[in-house]
Image (cartoon, rainbow, N blue to C red):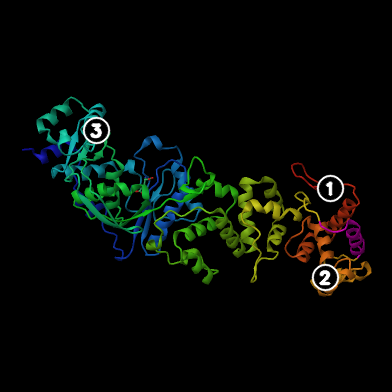
Amino acid sequence: MMDHAKLAQLLFPHVTQTPQQLLEEVFPPRGLKDSALVTRFAPSPTGFLHIGGVFTAMVGERAAHTSEGRVILRIEDTDKKREVAGGVGQIVQGLRDFGITFDEGATGDDTEQGDYGPYTQSKRAQYYHVFCKDLVEKGLAYPCFCSAEEIADLRAGQEEKGVTPGYWGEYAKCRELTLEQIEENLKAGKPYVMRMRSPGKPGDRVKYKDGIRGDIEMEANFVDVVLLKSDGIPTYHFAHIVDDTCMRVNQVIRADEWIASVPIHLQMFWLCGLKAPKYAHVSPIMKEEDGSKRKLSKRKDPEAAVDFFVEEGYPAEAVVEYLLTIANSNFEDWRKQNKTAHYNEFPFKLNKMSASGALFDMMKLNSVSAEVISRMDNVQVYEQVLAWAQRFDAALYGLLAADPDYGKALFAIDRGGKKPRKDIVKWTDVPGYAAYFYDELFTRDEELDMDKALQKQVLEAYIPLMDCADDKDTWFGKMKDICEPLGMSPDVKAYKAAPEQFKGHVGDVSAVVRMAVCGRKNTPDLHAIMALLGQEKCLRRLKDYMTELEGKPAFTNVIPGHTGFVIK
Ligand code: GLU
């Protein structure tokens, strides 16, 4: 008869605490209300932040904070091969950039906050050993000295016989080792792993309720799964049991690739005499390709990496807001009713998540982002663009930083009010949007569908009258005034009633001025643009356009690196 207490002492002489002591003294209950969810996001420190990771982290953060609970950022570094120097800091910063805030856990490469730490698994070895020793004492875990070769032979033999391969039941030969044999192996310095003694047998079933997918029934575990590897480091499974218990996590939210492991986890919790947390498995974000759906891939899809969104200049809140639209289908309705509310006021519900993976839809992201930007005021836009340009567009940064008042003023045009313009989708659009405010960025790559001679006549008549300081009515009045002498109509309705009587109308006059001053057919409020540009610049552009219409290239003061006029 095996003396389990003796074996436990032999294997873990350094462990003096029991799980009960730990849970009472080191990791006591949190004292939150019953409905408060304690969740965690648990990345490996690879430095790479997948948009699906941001999605899962956001779901965990929303679930915790909408229930007055807590959310933890735990670093799962048990697989040292995947670790990248500085990887934790990059992940922390990436999540922070997306406005995802954690109450506890890693705050940088070597820093953390909270009372339930350490929050990095490699620093928690002692706790895994406490729980493992306890299992050994109860006869529910044992050391296994089988080499990789022996395990491979076992598997091959099982496959030949047609039995389920794995270290289980009668095939788990180290289950039967005596204390003397174990002592001998230890003395000989043989490496070993710790395995749990599964009470299951093939064909057993297990049921659980998933917070997103509802009732799930699966085959129960019957394999003697490894708890600690030969270096004493836990497997993902055992670390999950110990950490989520100690950190008092009551709602596990993780990617659905872990669903297959739930039977192992439920059995481990049960063997340890612990209450399992609730589970919710988040479906991956999908991509449509050639008519079928597949997971967004780190290798194939640039938009899988969060850096893509940062470089393209999508504001972080736009990305989060988009992720909320795919997380909870009622988010968009809520947004329509609550136009100015912060998204954190949305009553997020885990059980409203869809069980099938949402499709990543760039068009939808663009429209959400344009909405989000349209709700910002000009100072917010200026500051976000400046911060983005500092990293990704030195020319734009130089221009915006040189005159902040001018920069803020250009973003104020047609902003605010009931129908703000939605023509900026992401910050990479800004150089195009702001082009006509800066000579250095100015281009004319559109052409008016209008007789060139008439355009020239419009300019000749308008130039002597133009005054950028005019109020809007006076400014528009002058455009009307030049219509009749040119055979055009100052009144668009009158023109439409008898187009054959006119060469055009006042809208065509403003189109010529717009093309001259801005180099394009569509812009926000032209009067406001001209007022901001000022008399000297406007006059020069009107004259330059005249020269262009005459077929001669206009004088331009283009700085190196910019295209300047494009003459067609
Ligand atoms: N470290 C695991 C992963 O990156 C986390 C799974 C979990 O959240 O439990 O997939």
Q: Which one is nearer the viewer's eye here, 270 or 380?
A: 270
**Within 8 Å: ligand 1 and the Cβ of disc 2?**
no
As drawn, 417 above or below 238: below
Left or right: 179 as drawn, with respect to 304: left
Residue 9, x across and y down, in percent? 14, 38
* Residue under numbered circle 2: 476
Crowding near the residue tagged with mark 1, few <14, some 14–19, many ≥20 C-alpha atoms within 10 Å: some
The residues tagged by marks 2 and 1 sit, at their Cα atoms, a distance apart of 28 Å
As drawn, 429 above or below 475: above
Badge 3 marks a residue whose secondary structure is helix
| Viewer-nearest of discs 2 and 1 | 2
Left or right: 20 as drawn, with respect to 307: left
Residue 125, x across and y down, in percent? 28, 41
Tell me if residue 384 is in the magenta stretch.
no
Badge 2 marks a residue whose secondary structure is helix
Q: Which amino acid does label 2 sit on?
A: Phe
* Residue under numbered circle 1: 556
Q: Quadrant of residue 339?
A: bottom right
Q: Which one is nearer the viewer's eye here, 535 or 357?
A: 357
Instruction: Check if mark 3's residue and mark 2's residue have beta carbons within 8 Å.
Output: no
Tell me if residue 453 is in the magenta stretch.
yes
Q: Dominant secondary structure of the magenta stretch?
A: helix
In this picture, which residue range is highlighted in magenta?
A: 448-464
Instruction: Check if mark 3's residue and mark 1's residue have beta carbons within 8 Å.
Output: no
Q: Pick the quarter of the image with the N terminus.
A: top left
Q: Which one is nearer the viewer's eye here, 16 or 509?
A: 509
* Residue under numbered circle 3: 159
| Viewer-nearest of discs 3 and 1 | 3
